[in-house]
């Protein structure tokens, strides 16, 4: 059963700026859904709507069959984890304390963290390769190190749905692959994953499904094989691609820019 779904969602930001136009997306438990598209296509706006951070002008977001807006903040915090793009921490917390914030929806008033809370934090920090930073001030981390710590915080929630906005941005190749492997593992354990990506090869290799947004609308939604085999990428991104396989997996490399529409070489 789909836990979280956006149904015909339209969002207007500012006077007359319609960022999303009747977009539907229902990530399935056990699958990684890649959300791709050019800059300004509406990807982050869709995640914000699905996380309950903004109210659609039209359409609705459902969680467990109920309107998301009718679900308590605490329950929403247990069901959905949202890893925002370039998340900042403005307090001089240690990395371990910052990751512990992911357990907030489970904490009871006037009671400290439980042994289970500490175990979840330790496990997530190990998975995200940030144990060595446990006592470091989070403000002293590099951008890539902080991104991994923020992912650890999201994983401690143990949500039914994880929304991740460009979690590989700013990471070196080793940690890009590490993050995508972690998301795949979480999906295989039953979590519904939605991840915004700009790297087409990561989308082709690690996603079960790819949804392409263009100018606020769904341009394609299907398996990576189907999406990348057609004309979607040239039409949406304005580039040609070179594709192939290695170790039985597909890679997609943007190769050449196409002339702007309406112009010829």
Image (cartoon, rainbow, N blue to C red):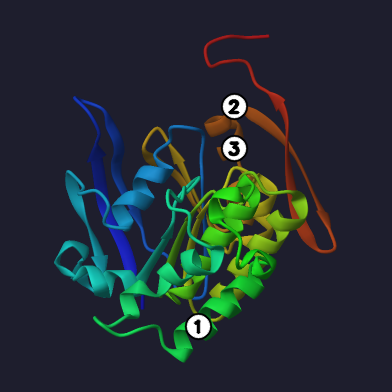
SS category of the residue bearing label 2: loop
Q: Residue at x 32, y 63 (%)?
A: 5
Marks 1/3: CA–CA distance: 44 Å
Image x and y of residue 102, in percent? 42, 69
Q: Earlier in the sequence, mark 1 or mark 3?
A: 1
Callout 1 touching callout 3 (CB < 8 Å):
no
Marks 2/3: CA–CA distance: 7 Å
On residue 241, which mark appears? Answer: none
Q: Earlier in the sequence, mark 1 or mark 2?
A: 1
**Is the residue marked by circle 2 packed among few (<14), some (14-19), or many (20+) residues within 10 Å?**
some
Q: Residue at x 24, y 48 (%)?
A: 54
What residue is disc 2 on?
A: 238
Image x and y of residue 225, in percent? 64, 55
What residue is disc 1 on?
A: 118
* Front-lying residue, 253 or 93: 93
**Is the residue marked by circle 3 packed among few (<14), some (14-19), or many (20+) residues within 10 Å?**
many
Quadrant location, the C terminus: top right
Image x and y of residue 171, in percent? 68, 49
């Amino acid at each position: 059963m789909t836990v979280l779904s956006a149904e015909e969602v339209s969002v207007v930001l500012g006077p007359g700026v319609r960022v999303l136009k009747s977009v539907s997306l229902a990530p399935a438990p056990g699958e990684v859904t890649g959300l791709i598209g050019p800059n300004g296509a509406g990807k982050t706006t869709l995640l914000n709507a699905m996380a309950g951070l903004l109210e659609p002008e039209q359409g609705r977001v459902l969680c467990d069959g109920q309107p998301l807006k009718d679900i308590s903040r605490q329950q929403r915090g247990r069901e959905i984890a949202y890893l925002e793009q370039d998340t900042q921490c403005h307090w001089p917390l240690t990395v371990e304390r910052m990751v512990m914030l992911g357990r907030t929806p489970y904490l009871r008033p006037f009671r400290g963290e439980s042994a289970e809370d500490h175990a979840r934090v330790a496990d997530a920090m190990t998975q995200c390769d940030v144990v060595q930073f446990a006592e470091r001030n989070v403000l002293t981390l590099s951008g890539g190190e902080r991104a991994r710590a923020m992912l650890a915080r999201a994983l401690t929630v143990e949500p039914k749905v994880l929304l991740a906005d460009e979690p590989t941005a700013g990471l070196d190749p080793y940690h890009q692959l590490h993050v995508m492997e972690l998301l795949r593992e979480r999906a295989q354990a039953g979590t519904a994953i939605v991840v915004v990506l700009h790297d087409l090869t990561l989308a082709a290799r690690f996603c079960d499904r790819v949804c392409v947004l263009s100018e606020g609308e769904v341009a394609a939604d299907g398996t990576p094989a189907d999406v990348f085999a057609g004309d979607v990428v040239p039409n949406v991104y304005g580039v040609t691609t070179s594709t192939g396989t290695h170790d039985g997996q597909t890679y997609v490399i943007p190769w050449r820019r196409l002339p702007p529409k309406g112009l010829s070489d």
